[in-house]
Image (tube, helix red, strand yellow):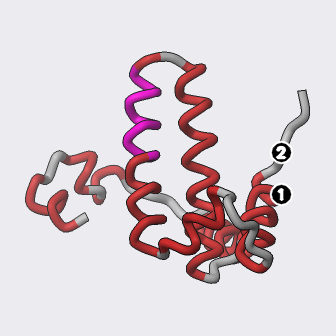
Amino acid sequence: MPQQTIEELHEQALERKQNPQTGSYTDYLYQKGLDKILKKVGEESTEVILGAKNNNEELIYETSDLLFHLMVLLVEKGVSLDDIKDELGSRLGKKSLLHERADWRGDKKNEKDS
């Protein structure tokens, strides 16, 4: 089975933004704009959560949808994969102390802020 990398998926989303194809779903998202793209990212995020509760096949399917919509969002906002990789790289070696994390402590006051 052929595979596609995240980089290829991002490049495809960028190509569709630069060279719209009438009738394509990606073009439709770009035409509708940021609010529609954000709505789809939210919907797909929820579907990933539900898929994870069901089975791995559904989780894989929904994660693929989410990754596609995230790539469209990144392109729409002008964020490159290198920007994401730089941010991930900046986190390497940093320790996250569990006792400092509100989500681990169950700190309801701080959870509302995140």
Residue 31 position within the rendered picture, expressed as x and y whole percent measured from the top left: 55, 74
What residue is drawn where x is 49% and y is 75%? Answer: 33
* Helix, strand or loop: magenta stretch: helix
Label 2: which residue? 4
Residue 12 painted magenta: no
Are the residues flagged by discs 1 and 2 in contact, CB closer than 8 Å?
A: yes
- Single out the residue that lies furthest toward the front: 23
Mark 1 to mark 2 CA distance (whole Å): 6 Å
- Mark 1 packing: few (<14 Cα in 10 Å), some, or many (20+)? few
- Single out the residue that lies furthest toward the top: 55
Tag of residue 46:
none
- Of the 4 image quadrants, the one containing the C terminus is bottom left
What residue is drawn where x is 60% and y is 71%? Answer: 74
Quadrant for residue 90, please give it.
bottom right
Residue 17 position within the rendered picture, expressed as x and y whole percent measured from the top left: 71, 75
- Of the 4 image quadrants, the one containing the N terminus is top right
Q: In the shown orientation, is residue 44 left or right of residue 87?
A: left
| Extent of the magenta region | 44-53
Tag of residue 8:
1
